Amino acid sequence: MTTVTAPALPAGHTIRSGLSRAGYEIRSYFRQGDTVFFTFLFPVLMLTIFSVAFSEAEFGRTPDGSSVTAAQYYLPAMLAAGVLLSGLQNMSIDIAVEKSDGTLKRLAGTPLSVVSYFMGKIGQVLVTAILQAALLIAVAAIAFDVPLPTEPEAWLTFAWVFLLGVTTCAILGIGLSGLPRSGKSATAVIIPIVLVLQFISGVYIQFSMLPEWLQNVANLFPLAWLAQGMRAVFLPETYAAIEVGGEWNLTGIAIVCGIWLVAGLIVTRLTFRWIRKDG
Amino acid sequence: MTTENVVEVRDLRKAYKGSEAVRGIDFDIRRGETFALLGPNGAGKSTTIEILEGYRDRTGGTVSVLGVDPQHGGLAWKARLGIVLQSTGESGSATVREQLRHFAGLYPNPRDVDEVIAAVGLDEKANTRIGKLSGGQKRRVDVALGIIGRPELLFLDEPTTGFDPEARRQFWQLIRQLSNEGTSILLTTHYLDEAAQLADRAGIIAGGELVALGAIDELGGADARIPVVRWVQDGVVRQERTTEPGRIVARLSAAGEPDRLEVIRPSLEDIYLELVGETARASALPEGTLA
């Protein structure tokens, strides 16, 4: 048997392929009308509906006496929802579809590494989630006069909660992509999970109004913590009083999301395969 | 180096939950050669080709593809292969050119994107999204993606399914050109004329076993190629199998012009059907048993 020494791939192949993949993924994302609507624009739509529907209602008052509007109250919730949709929902459905339509099988036959593939996916999630958050904040500020925080610390909190949240949700999305049995059933399997999580995590319903046991259940998952982190950024300091334990508990956010992130990474590392061999 | 093998398969076996889909096959593919793997549906063709591509793990035997065991083929190994899978169903929101440019970027020494688009005859569709192409055009994109990385070894699993006759002929032209440039090719196809046109050698798989292996014009052995002389005598069709048809024709014509005289040489298709049929008969239920 003749042994041929394969020419090594050029240095930086993984990074370069990953960046190329990210550009490709982002372009594909914005060409799919349904994903743009259901993951990208959906939180903006919901923010608009809540802001208009409850425009007369008052969501408490700030220490200086001005009232908190529906738009201000729902902005952090919709930012958290956006992180969940762009990260978990988009990622899991996308990969489930690619698994069943042959995309992954084709990629498995090319010199693309799994790492580059996920760089592309996470790059797509990051870019779309950042654009989505920017759009949400812009709509809230411009259309609904929501006062934005001015202290740099608040924006710093926003940045790390957002990035940790997006990364965690994206990794969990990769894990969940193995759940649907086919690409066709992907949306039917993933969307209910995402929807239930949003309802129990204080995205649509005020978290402090839920019974304590349900709050405890929700607090096992990252979304409730993300929503809390976003409230810490965009709601007046006094609102911390109605949170669990009467504080924003940023440490708790870092711990719970961190645990999910690490667990998600391990599960993904152990279970992800380009294709189901011998299926 | 001319006799170097790009593929070596020895006693390859693959079992799925008790049943053996591939039962010990052996063949080699030489560098620069086009090799066709033929056989009916479910004979084990696709299982074999997917084991060589690294998509499936074998249960027995040894396999070497470009000097590497496909079960442990890394990225550098994959960079030297081109794979055209049997079916693909991607939605395709990228255009033909975008898709090829992206895939070209994954390989260390790719072919020129526009040249490949022209070679598969999609110049006019270069800026069309793949999802909007017809089935045959999508198949050409598959072929283009298979060759964009300038592979040393190209796998073509039923590449021309859905092609019209003209597209098939253009495709044959392309494959001949690749072959002239030194690409080794493993082809599976249901079209025996395609195999006869393109392949240097072929193997026929039936029931998980290799029932014939050799140069296209020697397949099935000399016996399978013995011509038949057929004529009509007193209203009855008569025929004789012989290695010396001229002698029979001479004998017949000595007694006057024979009616409807023919000398028939078995085509690849006749030989194929004969070989595959034997296996089917051998594995069929004994006579008189209700299926």
Image (spheres, grey):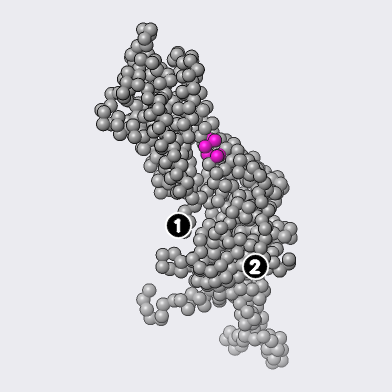
Range of the magenta residues?
A: A119-124
Secondary structure of residue under mark 2: loop
Question: Where does the image place residue B78, in percent across and percent down from the top left?
Answer: 61, 54
Apparent side of residue A96 relative to residue B186 in the rendered image (left or right): left
The disc placed on residue A1 is 2
The residue positioned 25% from the left and 28% from the top of the image is: A211
Secondary element at tag 1: loop
Mark with earlier residue (2, 1): 2
Name the residue nearer the viewer: B189 or A169.
A169
* Prevailing secondary structure of the magenta residues: helix
How packed is label 1: few (under 14 Cα within 10 Å), some, or many (20 or more)? Answer: few
To which quarter of the image does residue B25 belong? bottom right
Relative to the observer, which residue lies in front, B83 or B41?
B83
Residue at the spot of label 1: A279
Residue A243: % across, % down = 33, 22
Query: Image point 38% across, 29% down: which residue?
Result: A252
Q: Chain of mark 2?
A: A
